[in-house]
Image (tube, coloured by chain):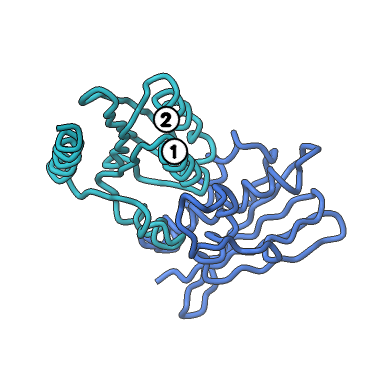
Chain colours: A blue, B cyan
Amino acid sequence: MKNLRVPARPEFLESIRAYVLQMAAAAGASDSVLFRIELAIEEALTNIFKYAYSETGGELEVACSVSSDPERTLTVVIRDWGVHFDPLRCEPPDISQDLNDRPVGGLGIFLIRKIADRVVYCPLKNGNQLALSFNVP
Amino acid sequence: MSLTVSSVEKQPGIFIVSAFGSLDTNTHQILEKKMDFLITNGAAKVITLDMKDVEYISSMGVRVILKTKKELSKKGGVFLIAHVQPQIKRVFEIINALPSLQIFASIEELDDYLAEMQRQVLDGHA
């Protein structure tokens, strides 16, 4: 399937989500894996809107591929042309605290790391690339 | 995806908020506005979020739940949740929110809890 390139704005979340989930469903992802993919993609995209393009607008490109090995891994690669932002270097929230004592934000990247089977960040000369992989049972 | 939210006041200050749809980046503000309104204008003491028809939640949705719980707690109120679907519960589990959230499996269970709360309040004022 052709890559999807759209403006990096929240109103395009739905079309990206539909594109990725269609690929994942075709690859045989179960409902629980589809939920994890949907959540990780949304969190990753929200970070691009917030950090990579915090001051300027821009575009992002999403590509999906499924490995042909017996593990059947679905990989979603998200590329943007914004400022460098490595989500893997963010300090994780302290989830041992009672909810009333915790800051209310900062959970998106934590969730990505917990629900994707593999996360690889690559800074590019002019932007960022994040690859999220999921084992499709 | 979309989100619709409605509320009923079961007793003065005791609200049940029912959400239907997806609690995500594009929809969380709908719930946030409703909760803010009930806390500031509705003088809510107890808010129960019925999540029976919430099929999806992202960190932005979780943020609204955490914020509501905090705001109510600051005002001496209580935030409760009813009917959480397994995938949503899994998200709460990942962020270790389950120990601090009061989640009820049914409205009957919730009603029993609220009746007990009311009984304790009445006893306290007796």
Residue B46 in the image: above or below residue A18: above
Q: Tell me which amino acid carries mark 1.
A: Thr
Q: Circle 2 marks a residue in which chain?
A: B
**Residue that appears at 53% across and 35% down:** B26
Which residue has dot 2 on it?
A: B35
Q: Position of residue A129 (x, y in %)?
A: 72, 60
Q: Quadrant of residue B87?
A: bottom left
Which residue has dot 1 on it?
A: B68
Please tell me how crowded label 1 is: few (under 14), some (14-19), or many (20+) other residues with Cα within 10 Å. many
Give the mark, 1 or 2, whose residue is nearer the N terminus.
Answer: 2
B108 left or right, relative to A69:
left
Tag 1 and tag 2, C-beta contact below 8 Å: yes
**Residue that appears at 79% across and 49% down:** A81
Name the image quarter holding the C terminus of chain B.
Answer: top left
Q: Position of residue A136 (x, y in %)?
A: 44, 69
**In whole angstroms, how far apart are the C-alphas of marks 1 and 2?**
7 Å
**Residue that appears at 43% across and 46% down:** B57
